[in-house]
């Protein structure tokens, strides 16, 4: 931010008093005060919006990470299910013995 010392502000006030005169100085000071207030409000709103945007970006990043982890876990579970199904499946290469009725 800008950093003004008291002596610099006093010098600006004296110059403004000489240039504007005592009649117009209060009106100009009020206008400058309003502009300063509006600028501060604008900067505060801008800062809040930037903070919201950064939070939204962070949430999107976390959501994408969670989605990636879930996808990987789903693929792992499918792979394990296939392995288990292959282990349980009877071996079809060996011909079954004929059933004796009697």
Image (spheres, helix red, strand yellow):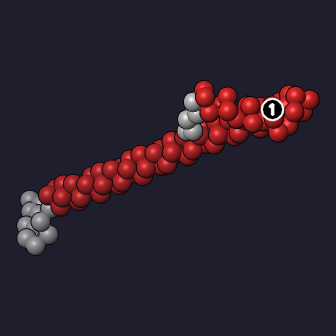
Residue 25 percent across, percent down from the top left: 85, 31
The front one of 98 and 8 is 8
39 to the left or right of 30: left
Residue 30 percent across, percent down from the top left: 83, 30
Mark 1 burial class by Cα count in 10 Å: few <14, some 14-19, many 20+: some
Query: Who's the residue at 67% across and 28% down the image?
Result: 10
Residue 91 position (above or below residue 11): below
Residue 99 percent across, percent down from the top left: 11, 63
12 to the left or right of 17: left
Residue 42 percent across, percent down from the top left: 69, 40
Q: Can see residue 5?
A: yes
Query: Who's the residue at 70% across and 35% down the image?
Result: 12
The front one of 50 and 18 is 18
Query: Who's the residue at 92% across and 29% down the image?
Result: 23
Residue 53 position (above or below residue 9): below
The front one of 9 and 32 is 9
Query: Who's the residue at 60% across and 38% down the image?
Result: 48
12 to the left or right of 22: left
The front one of 101 and 11 is 11
């Amino acid at each position: 931010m800008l950093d003004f010392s008291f002596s610099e502000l006093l010098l600006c006030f004296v110059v403004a008093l000489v240039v504007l005169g005592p009649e117009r100085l209060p009106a100009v000071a009020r206008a400058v005060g309003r502009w300063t207030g509006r600028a501060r409000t604008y900067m505060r709103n801008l800062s809040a919006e930037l903070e919201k945007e950064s939070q939204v970006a962070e949430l999107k990043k976390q959501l994408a990470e969670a989605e990636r982890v879930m996808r990987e876990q789903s693929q792992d579970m499918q792979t394990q299910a296939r392995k288990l199904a292959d282990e349980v499946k009877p071996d079809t290469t060996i011909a079954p013995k004929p059933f004796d009725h009697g």
